[in-house]
Structure formats: structure tokens, C-alpha cells
Amino acid sequence: MPRVSGVQPEYWAPLLAYHPSRAVLLNQRPSTLFADIADIQPLCPVPILGLAYNGIIWSKPGKGFYSEYPARSLREGRRIAGALAVGHVALSYDDIRESLLLDPKCNAKRLRQIAARTGILSFLRPPIDALPIFGQHVSANRGDNYDVEQFLSEAAATRASGAELSQGDVTQAKPDEALDEPERYVRELRKAKLLDTSGNGRISATQQGWAYLRSRVLPFPLSQLLYHAISAAREEVKRVAQAAFADALRLGTGLRSIDSQSALLSIDEIDSFAAVALIAPATVTNSVPVTASEEQVKNAICSAIGDSPRKDWGGEQNDIFTSRVTLNGQRVAAAFLLKGPAVRGRLTIAKCGKNGDQIQRLFQSAADLFVIQFNGAIDERVVAEARDKVLLLRARGSSAACLIMDGIDTARFLAAYA
């Protein structure tokens, strides 16, 4: 079997249970499990559910003692899952035990709470916007064309399997509306630059559509993992590594070591915002989400660094670009992405601009420090996306870093400088 993941197989074989509607793959090491799913799923006609268990629970000292640290194994597994676009959630022993003891009918509310807290609900309620993009990739992987009829068929299969389609997070289209008027819905996806259509009705996903899908990796029934996406990701890593090696030879320097820990900075590390350290997070929790407008936050930041705010326009790469931010005693070029109270709920990648591409445009700025600011909570996928872009820039020889400035940090900053 071809190892699409690039991860070499272990000396033992994983346990596999097969059913006409799905398959279950069992392994004790998350990283190996995710790699096996990526390798097997493109060849499997049904979706695969992978279960990784912690070997330290059953092992005994002196008798096949399990030596791998659970936390380290989990972190490694998450990195591989993200790289291979494998959707995953972490379940604790207590969650599983409690779920087994609850009655599905009498304790339905408690079971839904556990599912929501662990992230399972997001797997069972995929957004309608992701379905045609995923379906087109699957069809392309099989060498087939994708059209409106296939989209409707995929939606029916998804619902029949027990999943509930949710409102589109880009188009805001309700599932019933999209399915009742599929041609109109496809036009909305074209406006959002997630899909493109040819004259014969053939649908294809854009690069922006694939970037959106990677941020919403979800298991769709009767669909396959995006085989060619993994190959494309590996080619991109190879290309970047070759460029970094060529630069090192040309400049006569060694390859830079990439420190993932320092890729993300805290607001307390920015010299220009030193007064924030005097404001304890506990003193501003009641101020979150922050009600200050995006313009007020921009003016406060520009005032703190001694710069003048510029007028916004639709095609901008950033909201603030300045060379007046001081970091580690030196002035650095900094680009800011500001999201104000107009954004409701948690800041996700899809909410970063009309087409969800503001993060990509931010990192195209000629800066060394990239700041993502929001008045409330920031989704971890936004953080992961920013970190990955910083590491990519560092692999090319940049000294890039990113500051994630959520509602608490914004409230502390405004308390110190506004």
C-alpha cells in the first residue's frame, strides 16, 4: 500500500473492524493512527473512524511497560493530524465512562453537553458550504466530474447517515435553502470565490475554497480523504526546504533552526506595549468581549506606538502597517489585522474577511511581526494557521513572529493606553 502520509509503518498492524457503512481503526499511538487513516482512507469506500487509546492505562512496570509520555504523544498526533487534514477530537477516560453510564433517552441533555464540550457536535453538524467543496475534491480524486446533481446526492447521503447539515459559515445559507435552489447557491459560492463553474455546469474548487476546507476538516459520509491534497502539501514542504537550502548555500550560512515555541508572542513581550504588564488579566475579565470599535482600537494602538492611523479600504493587506513597534529593544516592521465588535462569537478563519482570506493577505505584508487582534475569543484554528505561516516564513530565512491579541489582551491594552 502506498504511504501517502510519508510516515513509515510500525512493526505491528493496527486493529481494523469493518462494516458496510464505516470502518474502525484502532491503535495506541495517535501519530501512527492518523498516518494509517491518511494512507488507507483514499482506498476505502467507506469513512474510517480512528480510535487511539492510551497504553499507559493498561501497562504494568516490568511487564511490557508503556514508556511513551501521553501528553507528548498527543501533541505529536495533533501535529500530524493537522498536516494530513484528518479531523480529530480528544476524549478523556472520564468522558467515555460517564457517557456509557448515561441513558440515551433520560440523559439526552447531559450527553449533548458532553458532545458539545468535546467537539463531537461539530463532526455531526458540518456546514453546508463545505459539502460541495469536499465533494468536488473527492470526485477529482476519482477522475469524475462534479455537478449540482452530485451535490444533492452527497447532501442526501450525509443526512441519511445521521449527520445534520448546519448553516454555511461563509455564505450564511441555510441547508434547506441551498438544497431547494442549488443553482443559486452555487452562484453564491462563486461570488465567495470558493467554487468555479465551467460552461457545461462542471464545478471545481478554487485554491481559496481548498484553504477554507482545510480549516473545516470534517468527516463526510461516503467520502474519502483528499489524497491529492496531501501530495500537494508534501510538494510545498519540499519546495520550501529546497529554497531554504539554496539560500543557505548562496549566503554561506547554515540552515536556520525553526523554533515553533517562539513563533507566537504574548502582548507582554512587546516593548511598545510594556504598560500592559501592569494590568492583571483578572481585572478586565468583566470587560470581555470588548465593546470598543475597531477604529477606537486602531487609534489607541497608533497612539501607543507614535504613529498615525490610515483610512481603511477594501483591498488592504492589513489594518495597520508600521515600523514604529519595538520588540526586544529593536524597531520592527509590524502588520495588524483588527477585528471589532461587528464580528459575533468566536473569531474563526471564515470570519476573517468576506472570503476568509484576510489572514493570508496579512502574511503577505512586508513585516516581521504580525498581529491578529479581536475583541473576544479567538478560535485555535486561527492561532494554528498564524503559527504555521510564521514557521513557513522562518523556513525561508525570515525572523517572523506573531502576536495573538484576544479580548483579554485587548481589554488590558485599552486599560493601559486608551
Image (cartoon, helix red, strand yellow):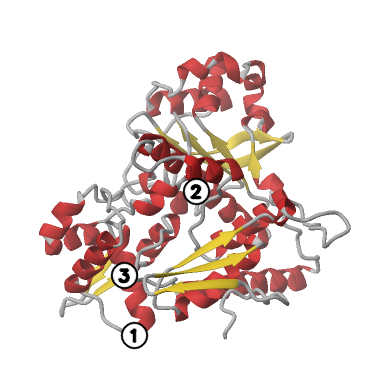
Task: Specify the quadrant of the image occupied by residue 81.
Answer: bottom right
| Most distant residue in the left direction | 181
As helix, strand or loop, the secondary structure at mark 2 comes to helix
Q: CA distance from mark 1 to mark 2?
A: 31 Å
Q: Earlier in the sequence, mark 3 or mark 1?
A: 3
Check residue 143 in the rendering and tell me which mark sits there, or answer none: 1
Disc 3/disc 2 C-alpha distance (Å): 22 Å
Above or below, 42 relative to 205: below
- Amino acid marked by disc 1: Gly
Three-letter code for the amino acid on which mark 3 is drawn = Gly
Can you give x and y, in whole percent of width and height, for residue 18 in the image?
A: 46, 74
Give left or right: position of 242 versus 167: right
Sequence-first tag of 3 and 2 = 3
Given residues 77 and 411, the one toward you in this image is: 77
The residue indicated by pointer 3 is 135
The kind of secondary structure element at disc 3 is helix
Instruction: Give above or below for 48 relative to 399.
Output: below
Image spot of residue 294 (x, y percent): 39, 29
Which residue matches tag 2?
Answer: 381
Q: Residue at x 40, y 62 (%)?
A: 219
Q: Residue at x 51, y 32 (%)?
A: 406
